[in-house]
Amino acid sequence: MIHHQGPCFQDLRASRRDSLQFLARPVHDVHPPMSSTHRSITMPATATALLDSASLALTSPVNAALAAALALYLWRVWWPSSSWATDLAASADRAPNLDATEPILIRSFTPRELAFYDGKQTDKIYVSVLGRVFDVTAGKAFYGPGGPYGNFAGRDASRGLSKHSFDVSMLTPIDQPIDSLADLTPDERAAVADWAGHFATKYTHVGFLVEPNADTQK
């Protein structure tokens, strides 16, 4: 039996043959190589000159520093509310003001002069231990009026501390010579020495306790 191939079948064979021939073509026939015009982009002369000038300027350390400073200034102007600027300002506010620190003047106190600093006649509270005077105002809850150590305010507390007693009888009257502590036992001397070390590390040393006939500096 002979089958006749119709026009549709012939057109399909022709299309298939053309497709196979297209795939068999060299790559350069499908995508022609770029010309020199396509491969290279010519930059305008003005832009080239600007880039050359910028490169030359940045080679100088001074010019580079000025450029960095200008960039930082513009950044601060455009973004003034950035977190970095806020944190920097907050750090400056938290920095201690060293100029406002009150200088400490070491001076001499007689027992009567020391008695003035009892937290009643003035806001300051001073206590003497082993001849040294300390500003214990920060411990007002203990040494201020009504405090557990309030009897020591403005007085020489050495004897009372050596005996672990806060009684008024441990205090030497302000019109008598300073207590020499000559009768203390070794344990009592060690106890008051420990107290003196405690005061020295916790409170500010402001002066020395001297006899009434000694010269004092106010």
Image (tube, grey):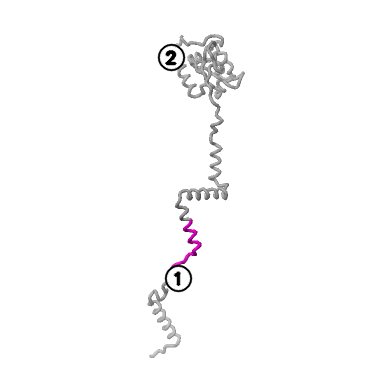
Q: CA distance from mark 1 to mark 2?
A: 104 Å
Magenta highlight: main SS: helix
Q: Residue at x 42, y 88 (%)?
A: 5
Q: Which mark is residue 197?
A: none
State which quarter of the image contains the N terminus.
Answer: bottom left
Q: Residue tagged by mark 2?
A: 187
Mark 1 is on which residue type? Thr
State which quarter of the image contains the C terminus.
Answer: top right
In x, y percent, where is residue 146? 59, 19
**Sequence-first disc among 1 and 2:** 1
Q: Which residues are magenta?
A: 40-53
Instruction: Say whether residue 39 is visible.
Output: yes
User: Is 86 situated left or right of 61 in this image?
Assistant: right
Q: Residue tagged by mark 1?
A: 37
Q: Is residue 112 magenta?
A: no
Relative to 176, is 120 above or below? Answer: below
Relative to 29, is 210 above or below? Answer: above
Q: Residue at x 48, y 64 (%)?
A: 43
User: Is 121 situated left or right of 191 in this image?
Assistant: right
